[in-house]
Image (cartoon, rainbow, N blue to C red):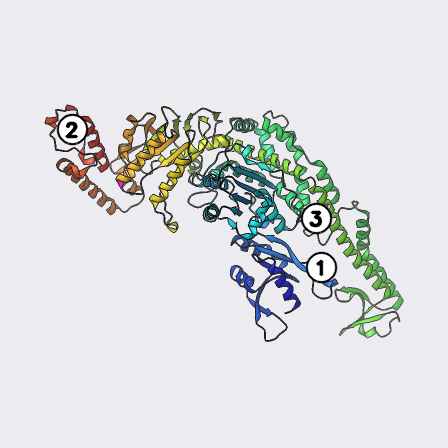
Amino acid sequence: MTPMMRQYLDVKGRNPGSILFFRLGDFYEMFDEDARIASKELDLVLTTRDRSSDPNAERMPMCGVPYHSVEPYIARLIAKGYKVAICEQLEDPMSVKGIVDRDVVRVVTPGTLMESSMLDESRSNYLCAIYLSDKTSEVCFADLSTGEISLTKFPESDMRHIKNELASYYPSEALLFGDADKVKQICEYLKTRLNCFVNTGSEIDELFKAGSAENALLSYLASTQKTDISHFAALRDNNEISCMEMDLNTVSNLELIGSLRTGEKKGSLLWVLDKTKTSMGRRLIRSWILRPLLSALAIKRRHSAVSELTFATVARGEIIVNLKNINDLERLIGKIAYGNAGSRDLTALSGSINILPVIATLLKPMTSSALSECASMDLLSDIAKQIDNAIKNDPPFSIREGGFIKEGYDPEVDRLRGLLDNSSKALTDIETRERERTGKKLKIGYNKVFGYYIEIPRSVSEDVPDDYIRKQTLANCERFITGELKELETELLSAKDNLSALEYKLFDELCAKITLQAKRVQQTARKIAELDVYCSFAEVAVQGNYCMPEIDTSDIIEIIDGRHPVVELMQEGSLFVPNDTFLDNNSSRTAIITGPNMAGKSTYMRQTALIVLLAQIGAFVPARSARIGIVDRVFTRIGASDDLAAGKSTFMVEMTEVADILSGATKNSLLILDEIGRGTSTYDGMSMARAVLEHCTDKKKLGAKTMFATHYHELTTIEGEIDGVKNYNISAKKRGDDIIFLRKIVPGAADDSYGIEVAGLAGVPENVIKRAKTVLKELEEKGTQINHSHPKEASPVLVEDQLSLSDLGSNEIVETLNNTNLDTLTPIEALSLLYELKKKIQ
């Protein structure tokens, strides 16, 4: 086997779980199975190479990519769920006899990305370590690119809480250790719901011998990155921060960070709120949306900052203009500390720091505590001064070639640069002297093979001075060198190499000094991010005519003229009909909402949940006024969907979500339940819907604030039977075969579902609509006959014998029937009518 292949197999043996990018000259090469995978995933041509010096030996598959454009290839492999180990040449091939020493300098994984081209600037890239046991569990999150690290501990191994914590961070990669069954559950959740790359096995088990999730995570980073990772900020204890826990269904159903239909940002709450101007602000606003506050004091602190900025129109505008010019301080200091920054990264950091005094001056008159803290941020002027003294204003892209250190920063740099700058004059002087000495028409040239040379036409090249040494003969000329020219060449070439090496050394020293101040930069970056989010909230409030909600610890949610923030913006000029909401834990615990399909029941309920969440993240809300008693959780059960891959029907998925809600909710929660029981038969579904509704409403069982939309009109009778339940409906008007949705919530139950009319609006062919009306009429007539002649077959609410109204002697029943138009009754309404009549005769 060749020495190079022995070296390759040795390195590969130490990195078995990664695709090895093996540096050979100007390419990263992959061999054997790695080559087969890479050629398929990256559309590369698969070639072969001799495995050994034996000509009869099997040839090895191989493929490669250029080292100078490797990032896109790595990014594609990472996106497909692979790890990539980067094996570099550790020596200069020109100065080594034999094989060059090589080793892995870094393992790139989804959770350890540092390159800007591979990262989304608007979201953090979290690696998480999860330890699971029966008694306690830990989840530690870290973003290598920003230095953020946090830890959450759970006193018991509750899978629901752990999943919700993961849903608020959306990690890219996870390390799992602990109880096998629990690891399996979380592993499946991470892969299928969060699209997260998961590491398990003996290698990960070894990491957790460090004793905690935090130590395991840091050990993993040290082993894969093989460099200093001391730039991490102080560990944040999430248990000390009072935030709302939200499950993934709520995040998805309320479209907090992505549209349900497309998954894109547009159409989400984040899309409405995000008017931030910095990358740091974009990441922070996303984090705030996913982690609403539970502390009234902390919420009011944010509201106060937003309120002050809404009134300070001129100052806010100037702050926003300056924020646009601030680069990503968090990731810049991360790159500098990590060791992969360039000179332009330093000037970007310096340029951003130089804007901070302007922002601080604009904030100085502000009186709210949050903005006062932002005004007193560390201006980092000493760091900017160090960079400005050392680095040119517009440095070259690469730091390997030099040319970026400022004149006057280092005397030796100035001397070597002066020598190189004067080289053309020295060469011109030699050329002039040699022309005078020889009397010949000659010139001095240069190429990489011979270096500097004197070129003389062949016609006059015979009679040259004795100190001329012939180096090359061409068709029309001869090329010579002299001792003087060779000496100057040596001096110039060494000066260039020495200058590049010296500039690189000075750059590393400067980065090391700045890295020592990393935590200062991170703290200032956090304040800029907060200011950016406050300005964004204020801009949205002003443009959307939002109000500052009143926050308290009562059990009341009172919204006057509330609007759905996303739907309102998506309508683009159409008038959004506002609605009121009142919920508490006493007389208005539960709102049963009925009305036609497409009338706006779901929109109304979701807008209530979104207004509550907006208030608790510290934003203003789309309403004329709002009083929000802090809720501890928001739960949603919306829509009909299945999970056939997991063997779950629509009803099974629905009931699983209902079970999670009923087991996780408290009396201080807000429940949004839309069409419970629609995935099974009418009677089963209605029974489940009623049972769930009664459980949510009953103070002895749950007693939570609940909004319950349903097409089961029979459930509206609960209003008079259970305390705390009130009926509301979305008003609509029918004109002939047309229906007009008024979008207004009014007290009372709906009088019809208008299903066929909605089908017509949806574009169902006219012949199908006509047939549906005919079938409906037949069913209603048939149902009437059955109700009169065979009551035991027609309704779940039965009387034992058929009775005449005269026997009952009930004028009230007679009056009710005389006022009822049987031709327009739906089956469910007929059933409800019978139920009411039975109550009157009991």
Residue at image mark 1: 91
Instruction: Judge the density around disc 3: few (<14), some (14-19), many (≥20) Cα neighbours within 10 Å.
Output: some
- 694 vs 775, left or right, is right
Q: Which residues are magenta?
A: 676-682
Checking the image for residue 390, the label placed there is none
Observer-side mark, 1 or 2, equals 1
Residue placed most toward the observer, 451 or 62: 62
Residue 487 appears at what percent x and percent y? 84, 62
| Residue behind mark 2 | 818
Mark number for residue 395? 3
3D distance between C-alphas at marks 1 and 2: 100 Å
User: Quick one: quadrant of the N terminus?
Assistant: bottom right
817 in relation to 191, above or below: above
Q: Residue 629 appears at what percent x and percent y?
A: 45, 26
Along the line of sight, the residue nearer the viewer: 255 or 128: 128
Which is nearer the N-term, disc 2 or disc 3?
3
Q: What's under tag 1, amino acid-wise?
A: Glu
